[in-house]
Amino acid sequence: MSNNQKKQLTPVQQEYQKLQKQREIKRPVVKNCIKAFLTGGLICLIGQLISDFYIYYFDFTEQTAGNPTVGTLIFITMLLTGFGVYDRMAQFGWNSCTCNRFWQCGYIACH
Amino acid sequence: MLAGHRTWIFEQKPVIISTGTVGGPFEANGAIPDDFDTLHADLWLGQDSYEKAHKILFEEACQKAMEKGGIQKDQVQFILAGDLINQITPTSFASRTIGAPYFGLFGACSTSMEGLALGAYIVNTKGAKYLLTGASSHDTAVEKQFRYPTEYGGQKPPTAQWTVTGAGAALLSDSGEGPHVTSATIGRVIDMGLTDPFNMGGAMAPAAVDTIEAHLKERNVEPSYYDLIVTGDLGQIGQEVSMDLFKKHGTPISEEQYQDCGLMIYREGQPVLAGASGAGCSATVVYGHLLNRMKNGEFKRMLVVATGALLSPLSFQQNETIPCIAHAVSIEYGGEQLT
């Protein structure tokens, strides 16, 4: 909350908020970052494997393998969302999952 | 009869002759599945939208209450109920099915006790012979409206709570066998300036404390008069903060007697973060679990304090603070009762 907003609070409200803050469970930021790093890395690893798969088994080069790779990742995400698995994964490693989704959307928009 | 400024004492002692409680799959997996009359394995309840499923939840709870009370739907004089969805359509649509005269209530998660207090007042003054009151919520329908659709996969902070999929309804009458509704204290809207919709417990705690202290003062009883003082859905944070406030104000409420419906319904290990919430939380736990325990003679007097956060999806997007409310109703069964 900005200081500007804080100024409008009455003394009773400010006192209560201080008390409330002590009991509030903090977001485990460091833990979340580590989880996001690992989840994000895992998704990239899967992406790399899919990309290699297209290069070795089909007629794609490193430059052209991007499109089918992203398509496959989006398809997997779609399935996971549909089966209700995605929201549970996201609670675990939100940053990376959502970033990947944004990245996919951006990729589609560019092409 | 009015006692003090905002407490009603019900001399006729309206009776909760029967109740109906319905839950979803997550509740079936929880700590008190045996206290539900009906549990659904499917979150959709065979419908094509969550809102329609929400409507069915409340319909079934009402039907179960009427069936257990042995009365027909044309004998019900009034329905007083509500939920959390915009314009409380699930409850209104369910009331269309039942066909009784209807008051739609909105008190967010405090609706269950708002309805019971008003219902008891109507029955106490001979305004009705049979009356249905209740509240309901549906996890995915409510999450979609107030936060994000579940499938979007937004990460929740540890202060967030899990909305209960369930409905609870009670059939009130002026005579019959069952627990008595003896008094009610109506809450004031209290706003401590909190803005985080993922920390409802912290926002609602002062409202609960205000209503409980007003009730004890106006009914002129000590906290020890009640075997149980149970809040609706403060969750872990709200409960701790309100206990801090009681200590600060010198109100002698013990930790054993002060409990929370939001911490009873799910078991350890379910991913509910700070506890349960939603209009269906206090309705199902009180009308199911707690009244069953009361009938088994585990305790005789309880004060139910349902807490509600009166925000709308629009108000929090516009960075408004979250005003909160709590209504208290005392339910007694057996034992000596105050006149």
Image: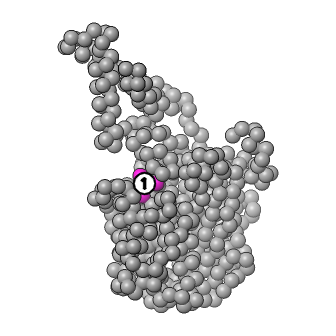
* Residue B330: quarter of image: bottom right
Q: Position of residue B20 (x, y in %)?
A: 39, 73
Q: Quadrant of the C terminus of chain B?
A: bottom right
Tell me which chain the residue with mark 1 is part of.
B
Magenta-colored stretch includes residue B126:
no
- Three-letter amino acid code at disc 1? Ala
Q: Residue at x 54, y 88 (%)?
A: B127
Q: Position of residue A57 (x, y in %)?
A: 19, 14
- Taking the spot 54% from the left edge, 90% from the top edge, the residue there is B126
Label 1 neighbour load within 10 Å: few <14, some 14-19, many 20+: many
- In-image side of A53 versus A15 (left or right): left
Q: Position of residue B85 (x, y in %)?
A: 48, 59
Query: Is residue B120 visible from the viewing direction of this image?
Result: yes
Name which residue lies at 29% across and 36% down: A79
Task: Check the image and report above or below for B273 versus B334.
Answer: above
Which residue is drawn at the image coordinates 74% and 43% (left, top)? A5
Seen in the image, is A60 located left or right of residue B333? left
User: Can you tell which quarter of the image residue B76 is in?
Assistant: bottom left
Q: Is residue B205 visible?
A: no
Question: How many numbered circles does the render carry?
Answer: 1
- Residue at numbered disc 1: B141
Q: Nearer the viewer, residue B247 or B54?
A: B54
Image quadrant in which the N terminus of chain B is located:
bottom right
Of residues A111 and B20, the one drawn nearer to the viewer in this rendering: A111
Toward the viewer: B301 or B147?
B147
Q: Is residue B226 above or below residue B11?
A: above
Give coordinates of residue B227: x percent, y percent: 57, 73
Instruction: Please determine whether, in this image, residue A12 is positioned above or below residue A107.
Output: below
Disc 1 secondary structure class: helix
Q: In the image, which residues are magenta?
A: B138-142
